[in-house]
Image (tube, rainbow, N blue to C red):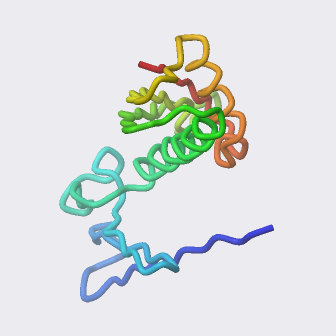
Amino acid sequence: MSQHSATIEWSRGSQPFTDGRYSRAHRWSFDGGAVVAASSSPHVVREPFSVAANVDPEEAYVAALSSCHMLWFLSVAAGEGYCVDAYCDQAVGHMTRAADGRQWIDRVELYPSVVFSGARQPDAEALARLHHRAHASCFLANSVRTKITVHAR
């Protein structure tokens, strides 16, 4: 099987630390060379200690689930002979409090809109089947306890 890695880097610099007034801005580096400016969510840690323009772990989690679903959807659609021209998802993750008081993203809703071309066009049933197969194949969806719902458009 494969391994996947990322390097997460943060440095305090000259900021105070023990009073909690330090920047949560950091960076994610990936083996292919991509570097992502990251931070805690301003919904969790107020600005200026969070950087709203940076990607936060919660957003990345939602994006990763959506991306995994999309990649499998494209693979499944191609395998069934459908030509996909465009795919857009406006995914939403919902943070809530568990019975034990801890916060977690209990559900992610995917709202994929897919544009097909060619003579072969999926009807509603075929589209639902494609999304179901993509969801069942997604490595990330198979790895989390978050409820993932696909609202195909």
Nearest the eye: 109 or 19? 109
Q: Quadrant of residue 26?
A: bottom left
**Residue at 71% of width from left, 40% of height from top?**
137
Residue occupying the far right of the picture: 1
**Residue at 28% of width from left, 61% of height from top?**
54
Residue occupying the far front of the picture: 119
**Residue at 25% of width from left, 81% of height from top?**
15
User: Where does the image place residue 67, in percent across and percent down from the top left?
Assistant: 49, 47
Instruction: Pick the quarter of the image with the C terminus.
Output: top left
User: Where does the image place residue 38, in percent across and percent down from the top left?
Assistant: 35, 65
- Judged left or right of residue 89, residue 22 is left
**Residue at 62% of width from left, 35% of height from top?**
146
User: Where does the image place residue 7, in percent across and percent down from the top left?
Assistant: 51, 79
Residue occupying the far top of the picture: 124
Above or below, 27 relative to 145? below
Instruction: Pick the quarter of the image with the N terminus.
Output: bottom right
Residue occupying the far left of the picture: 48
User: Where does the image place residue 61, in percent across and percent down from the top left?
Assistant: 50, 49
Nearest the eye: 19 or 106? 106
- Judged left or right of residue 63, residue 38 is left
- Judged left or right of residue 73, residue 50 is left
Nearest the eye: 25 or 144? 144
Above or below, 26 relative to 129? below
Q: How many marks?
A: 0
Above or below, 63 relative to 133? below
